Image (cartoon, coloured by chain):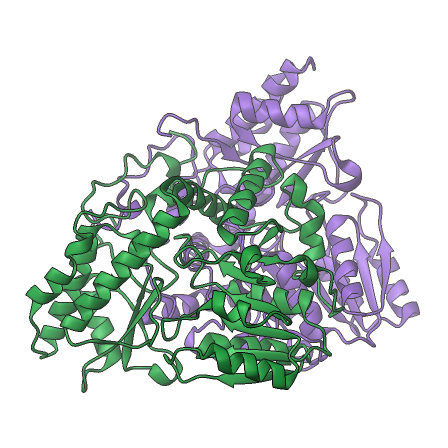
Chain colours: A purple, B green
Amino acid sequence: MRHERLKIVIAPGPVHVPGQLRDAARPMHHRSGAFRSLVLDMEGMLRELFGTSSAVYALTASGTGAMEAAVVNAVRPDDRVLVVSGGKFGKRWSELLDAYGCGARVLSFEPGAAVDIGRVAVEAGEYGATVVACTHVESSTGLLLDLYALALALPGPLVMVDAVASLGAEELVMDAWGIDVVVSASQKAFASPPGVSFIALSDRARVRAPGHPAFYFDLARYEAGLDRGDTPFTPALETIQMVHASLLQAREAGWDAVRERHRTASAAFRAAMESLSLRSVPENPSAAVQVFVLPEGIDGDRFLRLLEEKHGIIAAGGQDGLKGRVFRAGFLGQFDGGTLLGIVHAVAATLSELGIDINVSDAERAMAPVAGLPALYRGHSAHEPPAAGGRARNVQS
Amino acid sequence: MRHERLKIVIAPGPVHVPGQLRDAARPMHHRSGAFRSLVLDMEGMLRELFGTSSAVYALTASGTGAMEAAVVNAVRPDDRVLVVSGGKFGKRWSELLDAYGCGARVLSFEPGAAVDIGRVAVEAGEYGATVVACTHVESSTGLLLDLYALALALPGPLVMVDAVASLGAEELVMDAWGIDVVVSASQKAFASPPGVSFIALSDRARVRAPGHPAFYFDLARYEAGLDRGDTPFTPALETIQMVHASLLQAREAGWDAVRERHRTASAAFRAAMESLSLRSVPENPSAAVQVFVLPEGIDGDRFLRLLEEKHGIIAAGGQDGLKGRVFRAGFLGQFDGGTLLGIVHAVAATLSELGIDINVSDAERAMAPVAGLPALYRGHSAHEPPAAGGRARNVQS
């Protein structure tokens, strides 16, 4: 195992978990003062990041679990829900609403096409929507929704947003923008393993109590121990500690500065990919997830296999209608400039190996703006020595 | 951080995660062939451990999530459910059933008192129970239920068992014993972090389809991708890899041999504690969880604090009615003999520091049967050098 080649994950989540965060998981009991104060500290930082004075609950579940908690705790069966969908994760809202017998109308946009806020407002008005569910960054296409404008155009209905793929990389100010439900998860901009998700509800969302049968996703159970840092069920101890460490690091760097890193790294990477003739899919690209159409005749699976096996870079393939035709990358702002350039070289080499004519010097030039960028977390760089010692792995030395 | 003293967790879950399992989590994408084949391999081993030819589904949730999946997928609102309860986790079944409007009668036994199988059978008959829910090892008292005898005495009703705290340490043969629903979780005998739970349903349980609203816990969604190793939602990538590595190691050691380790280590530990005048709580003690009454006048919180701060041993306190009066330990069979003796010394020293007169040589003698026991996993011993290198922590070396 010592000689196994280590790989870099650039998939848009689960992302690469850096050494600094892995090392943050210490032996600890979840019903201890130490863990409780860590949970309280984490919750405070989550409120800052969400831009809310409401509680942010941490669930031991994937992002879909937190989306289900949103429906269970805030959507009534007699609500008229408008789902704004531009792909796989927009559809998930409507599947969830269906499962709970909540009426939903789906307003679909073509994959990658910008969401027309005016049309959303008109449709919401005509339908008499009491709730609008949307996706901040659609992970299947990389599209960024102008959430501020959307919320502004919808003063009446509850606004419920899946911010799993956006929070930390894109701005979102829950209270000031008038957002009612925000859902996110650990394995994206938090750079932590998957398995923990987050949800915050505005006051008017929290009092709705729609009465769906629920237990694990009943937020009243989370509220009960919140001010003591007590979770209702055994939490994902290690991942919670990593999320805490990740938030500490991001807050120290500055929430704005972290978003700026993601923006700069993503823009440079898109420019580099475009210079390699890979077209970026979304009309309004995000700083979180990047999706690129592969050249005609290139099989997506083969491209990904080569990129991983020969170059050690794990990216993601297309979903739904884009399957086999695109590759996806995400949260590039977590890496240092040297690693980012290495990723560009790996993509270029893979294309070349597949017989595509490429000019790597334009791509290199496109990466110049991030040349000096240090990694956001220790142990997230290809050019840094291994973390010291293996002590944390053993019971004691 | 390098000089921070590392602690041993002996709490009955989340348990100490050994270096061997931490190292098993590699950078990987969850929609890859490598991960899919790992999931398939894990599922096969889980079937062996559960003793079933039915599918075993892995959920990204705590054990309570899998218990909710049991209710959602197998209990109808018109069922008559008898809950056999001897403490906190027995009560959880009835809370869950209540949340789904399923009628339940609770048959309570005193904390630590053996479950009277005859009484259960009579009560089930009188009530006309169609489902009996029980707890294999009640983590709040350490009590072992004679599950084989219970299932034998209940040929009619569906038998649903919470095996979170038992599976891997206590025998359970789902198909042969006629058990219909078995629930377990990653943070106990699997020696992995919390956040993944497991559930298997017998054929007659699976076809019940009670129609409760559900999405994340709807097992049909898990069934759909099962034979390809595809999870319906982003799985806890790292923890799944650790569970897989843990099962590989346990199967190599032998499922029986692992249970035997837990039995031997627990029996020796109980004898040692009794020689220190700590009374074991349960009438029928398990090989999984040990619960001991502290001497009169000793404050449980103070005992635990001292044990951790001075001796680096993290145990757990009492729950519900036993709060402040007991300490709990679990899954001792994962440690090597030297570490086990160190734990006994730490408990003895803590008692002595609290003014209790103890004779440590009897306790040492009680540990003789496990003196030569090697650790079950690498990096789970206090007497082994740190794992080599820190390579896995970095993107690449």
Q: Is residue A12 left or right of residue A86?
A: left
Task: Return the residue found at the far right.
Answer: A126
x, y percent for residue B368: 14, 56
Q: Is residue A338 above or below residue B286?
A: above
Q: Nearer the viewer, residue B277 or B325?
A: B277
Where, quadrant-wise, is the C terminus of chain B in this rendering?
top left
Q: Is residue B205 above or below residue B351?
A: above
Splitting the image into 4 quarters, where does residue A183 fall? bottom right
Q: Residue at x 17, y 66 (%)?
A: B272
Splitting the image into 4 quarters, where does residue B280 fall? bottom left
x, y percent for residue A397: 20, 46
Splitting the image into 4 quarters, where does residue B250 fall? top left
Q: Is residue B87 above or below residue B216?
A: below
Q: Nearer the viewer, residue A93 or B235?
A: B235
Residue B390 seen from this side: yes
x, y percent for residue B233: 64, 51
Q: Residue at x 23, y 50 (%)?
A: B336
x, y percent for residue A328: 66, 36
Q: Residue at x 50, y 58 (%)?
A: B195
Number of marks in the rendered image: 0
Residue A163 seen from this side: no
Q: Is residue A325 left or right of residue B397?
A: right
